[in-house]
Image (tube, grey):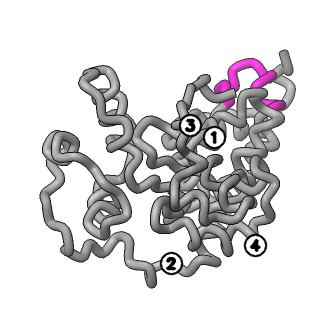
Amino acid sequence: MANNKQRYINTRFWNDNYISELDPIEKLLFIYFLTNEHTNIAGIYEIPLKIIGIETGIDESMLKKILPRLEDKIRYIEGMVIIKNFVRHQETSSDRVKTGILNCLKDVDLEFLKNIINKGFYILPPYYMDTLSIPYTYGQNYSNLDSNSNSIAEQDSASNDVVDVIEAFKEVNPSYRKYFGNISQRKAVKRLLAEHGKEKVLSIIAFLPKSNATKYAPTITTPCQLEDNLGKLIAWSQKLKDNPNKIKIV
């Protein structure tokens, strides 16, 4: 399970003009984006469309129809949920809260962050802009978020591949679900997929329960560990192949 968090919803939420105009299923999705366990204090986080569908019970094809209706307040871009004014509602004199927001923002690709701010998809008060050294260049066109660079189908396919790889860790680590909301783990999966392809990565993960129970083999239970120790695992498996009688299963 992800770390337990608390989100407070104003009691006037249901009387808000924008919310009152939404359909019931749109209201469900809107409040899900505010309260699911993957969200953070900055209101910008990565989550695959497939996981949104599993947790809300809304079919992926329906999600693609609903998401554009929420874009005045919430955007879903390249697998990232972006809640436009979230930080404004978190504004406080607490240094701890400010530090928490900044730590979340530092996990987001800087060019991606600049672009969504530049296009008005995400609003940051001056304190955060200055601290992150993001220039006030509203209207400038950054290239990293070019809507023509990746088709929706390509983005969905890549996102689903990441989900499939993380789900494969179910047989390796009972806490695998927390990797869905962990940016470092998801980035490790993306790099592994880019370097080795989905089929090979899945076959390696399928081998981990055996290798983890074997003497001298590197212990690998997370995507990051797999990326860091893949070379060691390959070297060990080669020794196992060359000297099967000298390596015993613990």
Residue at the spot x=30%, y=70% of the render? 119
Q: Position of residue 237 (x, y in %)?
A: 72, 38
- 229 lies above or below 250: below
- For the residues labelled 1 and 2, the Cα–Cα distance comes to 27 Å
- 39 lies above or below 203: above
Look at the image and give the residue range highlighted in magenta: 209-221
Q: Amino acid at mark 3?
A: Thr
Q: Which residue is mark 1?
A: 36
Which class describes the residues within 10 Å of circle 1: few (<14), some (14-19), or many (20+)? some
Q: Quadrant of the C terminus?
A: top right
Q: Is residue 219 inside the magenta stretch? A: yes
Check if mark 3's residue and mark 4's residue have beta carbons within 8 Å.
no
Q: Which residue is mark 3?
A: 11
Q: Which residue is mark 2?
A: 150
> Viewer-nearest of labels 3 and 1?
3
- The dominant secondary structure in magenta is loop
> Viewer-nearest of labels 4 and 2?
4
Check if mark 1's residue and mark 2's residue have beta carbons within 8 Å.
no
Which class describes the residues within 10 Å of circle 2: few (<14), some (14-19), or many (20+)? few
